[in-house]
């Protein structure tokens, strides 16, 4: 009889734990943020290429390729978060977030006053500031929440 | 020690990265205004100027003349108009 009451993996009648609910929320927030970030870059890659060139980190010859590959990676990671490939998507987005954070920190250290371009080029100026590092740290924490294995929770 | 990433996770990440890179490069190929390998920005130093640009004669704009190009004709006033 006790075997009948044992929890079955994937049993939808089970109430989700707090951890699982938080992980779901983290997935939804991360996916939403990266979908919103990728859309304007995909629609106007030339403007995003100009934003990347302003950072003066990459050779001019590869800026256009970065401007089209990065939003495609963001889109893939965000969509994967909503599928069973969520851990792969979270890992990909965590890697992107680490790269973005390093780039922003480098720009701050060099004293460059430029537009972030994080959500494409908008009419509202979005100069790079330490707040961007805090925001990225928060998003990275959400990705880590998705990546925490079940046996650790 | 708990293993955070499995082989499956890493395989998914690699596949997603490859898919994103491929899609991005296809997108780049479909955008004629974005060359795949962009030309480096032109040098702005005087030493970097090409010879042709240095030796190019400076064309001055034609001096503005006070003479009208078309001879002015007296404007006839309508009959009964103000002088």
Image: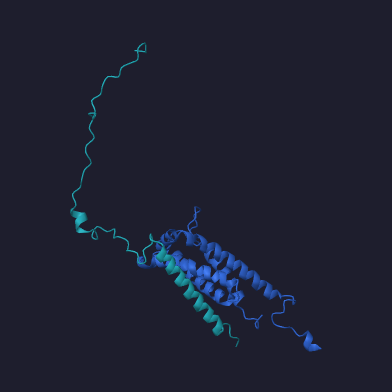
Q: Nearer the viewer, residue A116 or A16?
A: A16
- Is residue A109 shown to the viewer in this render? no
Q: Is residue B74 above or below residue B2?
A: above
Q: Is residue A136 above or below residue B49?
A: below
Q: Residue B67: horizontal and vertical position, in percent?
A: 22, 29
Q: Is residue B51 visible?
A: yes
Q: Colour of chain B?
A: cyan
Up the image or down, B54 lies above or below B65; here it is below
Looking at the image, which residue is at 47% across and 68% down? Answer: A70
Rendering quarter of residue A111? bottom left
Question: Vertical placement of B69 versus A68: above or below?
Answer: above
Residue A151, picture quadrant = bottom right
Q: Residue at x 52, y 77 (%)?
A: B13
Q: How many numbered discs, if any?
A: 0
- In what quadrant of the picture does the C terminus of chain A appear? bottom right
Q: Which chain is blue?
A: A
Q: Nearer the viewer, residue B61 or A107?
A: B61
Residue found 50% across the figure and 71% down from its top = A96
């Amino acid at each position: 009889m006790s075997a009948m009451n044992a929890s079955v993996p994937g049993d939808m009648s089970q109430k989700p734990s707090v951890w699982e609910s938080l992980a779901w929320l983290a997935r939804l927030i991360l996916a939403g943020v990266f979908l919103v970030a990728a859309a304007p870059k995909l629609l106007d890659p030339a403007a995003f290429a100009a934003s990347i060139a302003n950072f003066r980190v990459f050779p001019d010859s590869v800026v256009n390729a970065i401007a089209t590959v990065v939003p495609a990676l963001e889109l893939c990671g965000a969509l994967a978060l909503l599928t069973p490939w969520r851990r792969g998507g979270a890992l990909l987005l965590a890697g992107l977030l680490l790269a973005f954070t390093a780039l922003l920190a480098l720009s701050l250290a060099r004293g460059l006053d430029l537009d972030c371009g994080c959500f494409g080029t908008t009419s509202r100026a979005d100069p790079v500031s330490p707040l961007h590092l805090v925001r990225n740290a928060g998003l990275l924490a959400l990705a880590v929440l998705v990546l925490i294995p079940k046996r650790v929770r | 020690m708990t293993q955070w990433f499995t082989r499956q996770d890493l395989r998914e990440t690699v596949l997603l990265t490859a898919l994103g890179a491929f899609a991005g490069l296809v997108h780049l190929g479909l955008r004629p205004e974005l060359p795949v390998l962009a030309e480096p920005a032109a040098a702005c130093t005087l030493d970097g100027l090409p010879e042709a640009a240095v030796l190019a004669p400076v064309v001055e704009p034609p001096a503005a003349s006070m003479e009208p190009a078309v001879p002015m004709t007296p404007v006839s006033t309508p009959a009964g108009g103000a002088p």
